[in-house]
Image (cartoon, helix red, strand yellow):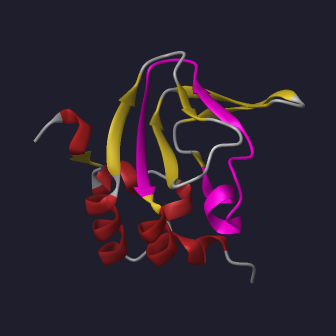
């Protein structure tokens, strides 16, 4: 298996606060479907205005969130996530996320997000 197609591990995903309420079998299925990637410092992971087709979790490293009109917005650390706005609202990416340090991310496609994660973002 090439490094580009290594799935995220259940152990890695279980450390993500957002996933804490997921049943074990859902977390296992999510781990099988999420792709794990290493990202070099300075690399844009997503770009504002692009079509959003993946949801991301930062497993390690630090990334910067910026918007063209507002500049730097915040810093993401391991355990945080991004990309849900474009998927949940079906709009283009609302910000650019750039790796500030070498990062490891796990990501899933829209179908996986819709099936397993969208309920986590539903309004109660």
**Residue 12 point in image, percent of width and height:** 35, 48
Quadrant that contains the C terminus: bottom right
Q: Residue at x 60, y 26 (%)?
A: 98
Q: Residue at x 49, y 67 (%)?
A: 113
Magenta stretch encompasses residue 69: no
Quadrant that contains the N terminus: top left
**Residue 117 point in image, percent of width and height:** 51, 70
Q: Residue at x 31, y 61 (%)?
A: 33
Which residue occupies the extreme bottom position in the image? 124
Pick the front one: 112 or 100: 112
**Residue 107 point in image, percent of width and height:** 43, 50
Position of 62 relative to 41 (above/below): below
Pick the front one: 57 or 67: 67
**Residue 78 point in image, percent of width and height:** 52, 37
Which residue occupies the extreme right position in the image? 70
Which residue occupies the extreme left position in the image? 1
Question: How many discs mark residues in the rendered view?
Answer: 0
Position of 124 relative to 54 (above/below): below
Q: Residue at x 71, y 59 (%)?
A: 91
Q: Is residue 1 rendered to the left or right of residue 95?
A: left
Pick the front one: 11 or 122: 122
Q: Is residue 15 rendered to the left or right of residue 122?
A: left
Magenta stretch encompasses residue 93: yes
Q: Which segment is the magenta one?
A: 83-108
Q: Is residue 16 rendered to the left or right of residue 30?
A: right
């Amino acid at each position: 298996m090439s490094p580009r197609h290594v799935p995220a591990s259940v152990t890695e995903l279980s450390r993500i606060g957002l996933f804490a309420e997921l049943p074990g079998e859902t977390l296992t299925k999510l781990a099988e479907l999420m792709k794990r990637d290493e990202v070099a410092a300075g690399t844009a992971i997503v770009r504002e205005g692009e079509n959003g087709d993946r949801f991301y979790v930062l497993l390690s490293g630090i990334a910067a969130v910026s918007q063209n009109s507002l500049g730097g917005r915040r810093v993401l650390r391991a355990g945080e996530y991004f990309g849900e706005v474009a998927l949940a609202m079906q709009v283009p990416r609302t910000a650019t996320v750039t790796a500030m340090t070498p990062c490891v991310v796990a990501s899933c496609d829209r179908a996986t997000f819709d099936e397993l994660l969208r309920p986590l973002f539903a309004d109660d």
